[in-house]
């Protein structure tokens, strides 16, 4: 393995603990320089928080790193090995079009992975070219920033660099490399790979490393508490997805990060009209990863994770299985509690009452009946405005509104306090699917990044309720039909 190392003044501080694991977990890789790199977007705010110098990142040397042509000083490029249940079928995988440059230490001491996506072939490419198209990489940049603005744990996008080289899918497309920042890229599928290809000793090695990285407060060897921590993180994450109408699209086990961040923005999208059975992915023919299936699939994925830990939980197999089942059984209650707490905030309820879940579910049922826009319904309620459309004009909603006003207290002060909480909990703007496509078309087809930059700036503070956000609140024209997304590979 060889790669071109380059000294930059960007401020990279690498300490590559993952590369100190046994080589079983990765393959060292060579870089694949590109012919004519050009910086498409740079996340200046993220760069600053990482202690990186914007001018240096934009320089020729900085661009060489972001395009995957050269590794910065201190990096140790590798491709991670992992497996994954893809639509229910276990497959041995790995970073087929990505490489981990290493772990950067930010000014506050945070350790983050710096990964290049679309950087070329690796030993796990399985015949693919290892490259990525510009559109999907820009899409990940937009949506991951939108998720961060919403307060949802997520990987981030530091930059997208156009390669100046084509990639060939159904059509010839411009190529690009995305620089992704993550708490780590350790997945449920990483543990499945360790268990399937290595056995209990490799699972123990990976678990010890992951605990030190994500749960350092736990005692060494307390694998049961580690399992419970992962279950909690996923329950809270999926609840946050549901509360903003986010559909991941492909919740394979290799797309579930142990650190609890949203990872891999392929065929993802946000709900417009509220329909719990919504599927966006063009390849999800049976609705496995529909919006209303996400909590169930998360629990299923966690069960696969738990299976890998069984040898570590107890020497007695029956005892280990009992501990595992108890941990997984906690997921539904954890999810429901997190979801209901979030829904109380969305409805401006500042305390708890037994009827709250019914109040929330009854509103959702009305929204489904009238195909009301998910985001706009809650935003309208938050503003205290009189809504328009079939939902707000229905007798059933009028009855629901009476119940809601009685629940929050009925006085002007109580209603004002409720609206304040609601505006802090209900976004005025999301990454509307048609707006994302509009931005991508302008950037990819017209080399105009103004539309994309304005969209991202709007999404960075979705709870601001500014006049500028109003134009991004409109749902798509019904004539656009059902939205479909693709993996972009």
Image: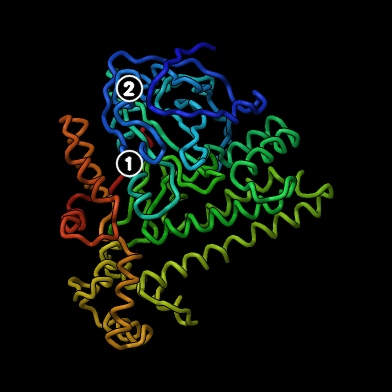
Residue 184 vertical placement versus 176 (above, below) = below
In percent of the image, x 65 and y 38: which residue is there?
209
Q: Is residue 27 left or right of residue 366?
A: right
Residue 271 vertical placement versus 134 (above, below) = below
Quadrant where the image shows the C terminus: top left
**Which mark identifies residue 86?**
none
Q: Residue 429 in the image: state x and y as whole percent.
A: 26, 56
State how far apart marks 2 and 1 are (Cα). 17 Å
Residue 134 vertical placement versus 86 (above, below) = above
Quarter occupied by residue 140: top left
Q: Is residue 302 left or right of residue 46?
A: right
Q: Nearer the viewer, residue 123 or 86?
A: 123
In percent of the image, x 83 and y 47: which residue is there?
315
Quadrant where the image shows the N terminus: top right
**Which mark identifies residue 45?**
1
| Residue 95 makes an appearance in the image | no
SS for callout 2:
helix
SS for callout 1:
helix
Q: Residue 55 in the image: state x and y as whole percent.
A: 29, 28
Residue 485 vertical placement versus 422 (above, below) = above
The residue beneath circle 2 is: 63
In percent of the image, x 32 and y 41: which residue is there?
45
Q: Sequence order check: which comes first, mark 2 or mark 1?
A: 1
């Amino acid at each position: 393995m060889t790669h071109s190392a380059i000294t930059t003044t960007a401020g990279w501080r690498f300490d590559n603990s993952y590369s100190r694991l046994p080589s079983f977990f990765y393959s060292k890789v060579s870089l694949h320089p590109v012919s004519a790199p050009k910086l498409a977007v740079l996340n200046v705010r993220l760069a600053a928080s990482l202690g990186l110098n914007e001018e240096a990142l934009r320089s020729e040397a900085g661009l060489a790193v972001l395009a995957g042509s050269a590794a910065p000083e201190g990096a140790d490029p590798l491709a991670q090995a992992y497996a994954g249940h893809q639509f229910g079928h276990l497959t041995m995988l790995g970073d087929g079009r990505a490489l981990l440059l290493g772990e950067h230490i930010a000014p506050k001491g945070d350790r983050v992975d710096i990964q290049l996506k679309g950087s070329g072939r690796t030993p796990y490419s399985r015949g693919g070219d290892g490259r990525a198209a510009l559109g999907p990489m820009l899409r990940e940049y937009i949506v991951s920033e939108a998720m961060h603005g919403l307060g949802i744990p997520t990987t981030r996008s530091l930059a997208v660099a156009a390669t100046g080289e084509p990639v060939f899918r159904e059509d010839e497309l411009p190529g690009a490399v995305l620089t992704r920042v993550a708490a780590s890229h350790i997945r449920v599928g990483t543990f499945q790979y360790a268990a399937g290809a290595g056995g209990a000793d490799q699972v123990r090695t990976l678990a010890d490393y992951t605990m030190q990285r994500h749960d350092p407060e736990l005692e060494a060897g307390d694998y049961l508490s580690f399992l419970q921590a992962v279950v909690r993180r996923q329950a809270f994450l999926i609840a946050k997805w549901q509360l903003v109408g986010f559909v991941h699209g492909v919740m394979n086990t290799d797309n579930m990060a142990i650190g609890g961040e949203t990872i891999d923005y392929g065929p993802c999208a946000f709900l417009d009209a509220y329909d719990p059975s919504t599927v966006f992915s063009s390849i999800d023919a049976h609705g496995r990863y529909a919006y209303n299936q996400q909590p169930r699939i998360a629990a299923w994925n966690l069960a696969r994770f738990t299976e890998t830990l069984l040898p570590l939980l107890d020497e007695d197999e029956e005892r280990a299985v009992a501990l595992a089942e108890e941990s997984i059984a906690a997921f539904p209650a954890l999810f429901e509690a997190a979801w209901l707490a979030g829904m109380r905030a969305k409805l401006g309820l500042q305390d708890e009452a037994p009827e709250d879940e019914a109040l929330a579910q009854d509103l959702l049922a009305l929204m489904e009946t009238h195909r009301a826009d998910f985001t706009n319904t809650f935003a309208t309620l938050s503003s205290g405005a009189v809504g328009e459309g079939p939902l707000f004009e229905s007798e059933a909603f009028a009855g629901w509104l009476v119940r809601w006003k009685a629940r929050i207290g009925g006085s002007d002060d109580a209603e004002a306090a409720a609206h304040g909480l609601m505006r802090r909990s209900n976004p005025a703007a999301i990454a509307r699917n048609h707006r994302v496509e509009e931005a991508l078309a302008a950037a990819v087809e017209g080399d105009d990044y103004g539309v994309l930059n304005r969209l991202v700036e709007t999404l960075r503070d979705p709870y601001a309720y500014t006049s500028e956000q109003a134009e991004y609140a409109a749902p798509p024209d019904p004539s656009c039909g059902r939205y479909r997304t693709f993996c972009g590979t």
